[in-house]
Amino acid sequence: MAQWLELEEPLRTREPAPQWKAFLELGFRPLYLLGCLWAALSVALWVYAPQWIAGRMPGVFWHAHEMLWAFVATIAVGFLFTAGSNWTGRNPLQGRALGTLCLLWLVARAGFLLPGPQAFAVAALCETAFFCWAALALGRAIQVARSRRNYGLPLLLAGLGVADALYLWSIWQGDYGALMQRFNAGLLCMAVIALLIARRVIPFFAMRAVSGLQIPMHTASGQWQLGAGVVAIACLLAGWWPGLAAGLAVAGLIALWQVLAWKPQAVRRVPLLWILYLGHAALGAGLLVAGAHAAGWVLRPAWPVHVIGAGGFALLIIGMCTRTSMGHLGLPLRTDRSMVAAYVLVIAAAVLRLAALLPTALSLAALHASAAAWVLAFALYLWRFAPLLVRPRADRQA
């Protein structure tokens, strides 16, 4: 068991003072910090202090919006900015521009909590500007570098932003009939982005970490998966449920097949990898559940949303945030106790959240336990990495 965890405490050296220049040099630094902080705070508000959610968005719609766009999509923007600088040789956004982008995000978070239409309008404009600017910055870097294999990413990010703007417009108009379609469109855009990212980086991370491991990159299956995801989004917008169910099922089955082809038995003792494998598998399973819902076999929409979100997205995020933070901060790629504990807590939070959907006497207790595990998981990430995200890389310190 001890060998399976491969725990090693980080070496403590004299740390330099926090620097704005370091903090704003790459997108992952401020956006991982803000996204993970909000993941913990927003769930704590939603479960333990809902009376503080006083904005124009009713509670459950606020929770759904903040989880998808303020947490998951924000982490995705941070990752894409950072990976995009590697893929293209150009940093999409840094320095004051990146700081201004984060300020837009912060104003949006405050505005959605405050009462009154003016606060909501300012928040909606800031959030729309956040995603428009992020998509344009990423697209500019990709276009200048002529990185053709990445042309679809800024379009998907723009689609995620458009779905967000339409969701907020539905709230403003009081059109709750269109709300779920627009939320689901954003959820599927985010799922396609997550599948694209995971399919590229998980095999790369695995082959670097496990000596002698050779696994396929699945470029062809990834293209089929992308096509199935785009078809599913188009069918959702057109209201054609059989096509939606088929597209989701194909994308989900391909994801599960990819995990099996990546030789999961080879990474069972490497926490940095098995958490990503689990996340990709959970995302695939979530897409299958979503397909079953579209086909009328699963009646409650909360099931696909939480399998995809609390299972797939959350596991991938806690894994990616630790792995990419260590890589870009110049740290050894080995987990310590806090990281493994965070992984276990996110898994527990996902299982308990799904258990809370069951109509039992323990549903409320499961919900509260899930929220506690979730908050603690992201608090552990922040405790471990926040002091490093605001400082220069460890391997650049004099």
Image (cartoon, helix red, strand yellow):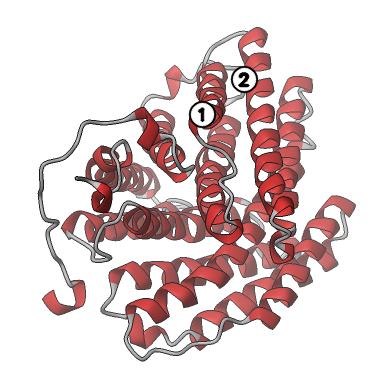
Q: Please provide percent x and percent y for residue 281.
A: 50, 72
Secondary-structure class at tag 1:
helix
The reply, left or right, for residue 298 in relation to residue 106 is right
Give the answer, above or below, for where 362 lies relative to 277.
above
Give the answer, above or below, for where 58 lies relative to 27.
above
Say what amino acid the circle numbered 2 marks: Ala
Say what amino acid the circle numbered 1 marks: Cys
Identify which residue is drawn at 49% across, 87% down.
215
The reply, left or right, for residue 33 in relation to residue 232 is left
Q: Determine the CA span between mark 1 and mark 2.
A: 13 Å
Residue tagged 1:
102
**93 and 313: which one is in front?**
93
Q: Is there any visible trace of residue 156 in the rendered image? A: no
**In the picture, which quadrant includes the C terminus?**
top left
- Which label's residue is closer to the chain start, 1 or 2? 1
**247 and 300: which one is in front?**
247
Residue 132 in which image quadrant: top right
Residue 123 got which mark? 2
Identify which residue is drawn at 50% across, 18% down.
110
Q: Residue furthest front?
A: 398
- Please state the total of marks drawn on the protein image: 2
Give the answer, above or below, for where 203 lies relative to 7.
below
Secondary-structure class at tag 2:
helix
